[in-house]
Image: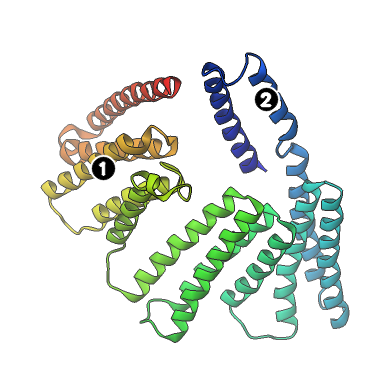
Amino acid sequence: MPFFRKNHLMFRRYLCREIDQWTQAGLLQPGQGAELLADHDRRHTGFKLSSVLAILAAVLFGAAVIALVAANWDAIARPLRVGMIFLFILSGLFTAAVALRRGAGWLSEAALVFALLCHGAGIALTGQMYHLSGDEAAFMLVWTSAALVVSFCFRSPMAAVGAGLLAFGYLLAQSAAFGSRAADVSDVAGYLTVVVLALVVGLASWRSRSTVAAHLCALILIGWVVWVVDDTTDLDLGYVLAAIGAVAFGIGSLGASRLGGGVVRHGTVSAYGAVLFLSGLIAIQVELADPGLVSEIVLAALVMLASVAIVAVAGGDNRFIRRFAYFTFAGETIYVVGETLGSLLGSAGFLFLGGLVLAVIAFAVMKIEKRFKAGEGRS
């Protein structure tokens, strides 16, 4: 899959830098670094095009089977319908087990995708056939639980990612079902269920070593916070996101050394904190009703200063953080130009000045990136 390939390339670049530093420090003899890298490439080939095509084929094949069964649903006897659904699911799981035993991980992942698709279709079609009561949230919960079981049993990254997506779908369905009501017993049960699902998705990502599933776990928890705040309080979400982001960024960038190996310094926690903090500030800026020109400029300046501070603290070690901060700074700059000079210069003048400002920012970013690369080379 593309995300596995991306993670592999990122780790390979990191390994190349480490090998160069080890060689310069005399820990490795000349030529040994190249041998280590070649051995890494032989043993970590990542997903190939064949695996991607196999998983896509499983998705299409599963959709075709579902469409075929649904189209002829009325012509098939009820016991045969249920038997066919179970047969499709068991065939996918059996194929995955055999493929995994023989070392064909790509075929195992494809078979598990097919089995999970058939399971979801089976839930929907069986509920329709027997007129079982239920809502979208219950449907997503059952489907998510099955994906988690499959992920733990097979240590499947694809099943873990699927469980994360389905859990996020459960969050959306559950929050829409509750609406904006005061908290009661049902709401608390829903809140706890989402938290449990998020934690189990996190465990599945750890067991399967799926980075994408781990990110989905974090997104589910963020969405859960937004839902609970919006559903039970009158707090402004912008302030909540900014506060959570500031705490996460502080833990990930300033307090990581005290936490040992639990949190990587300037790593994923810092990145989520930076994104949430800047997004919360922008949300506050957008939601203010008729703040006045002075207040708008002050808020924009605050966002720009926050972007610069984030780059100064964690940008040198995390490319995603500094790129998001660059984008935020550039957007706020164009916003300030538009608010202060846009009406005076007209459309053509505003576009010209905006282009000039972006060119200056691009030049500054290029210089900053060169400094970061030079620092990496000296370290």
Viewport quadrant of the N terminus: top right
Q: Position of residue 191 (x, y in %)?
A: 46, 74
Q: Is residue 218 above or below residue 316?
A: below
Residue type highlighted by circle 2 = Leu
In this rendering, is residue 87 above or below 50?
below
Compared to residue 306, the image places residue 118 above or below, namely: below
Residue at 25%, 56% (x, y): give it: 284
Crowding around mark 1 (Cα neighbors within 10 Å: few <14, some 14 to 19, many 20+) is some
Q: Which residue is mark 2?
A: 36
Please identify the quarter of the rendering in which residue 340 is found. Answer: top left
Residue 342 location (% of width, % of height): 20, 37
Residue 279 visible in the shown view:
no
Rendering coords of residue 359 (x, y %): 31, 24
Q: Nearer the viewer, residue 96 or 286?
A: 96
Q: Secondary structure at mark 2?
A: helix
Left/right placement of residue 115 relative to residue 203 reads: right
Could you tell me which residue is drawn at 65 percent across and 70 percent down?
Answer: 145
Q: Is residue 134 left or right of residue 117?
A: left
Q: Nearer the viewer, mark 1 or mark 2?
A: 2
Picture coordinates of residue 320 (x, y %)? 44, 38
Which residue is most to the front? 27
The residue located at (60%, 73%) in the rendering is 141
Q: Is residue 62 visible in the rendered structure shown here?
A: yes
Label 1: which residue?
A: 306
**Mark 2 surroundings: few (<14), some (14-19) or many (≥20) residues within 10 A:** some
Towards the viewer: 327 or 39: 39
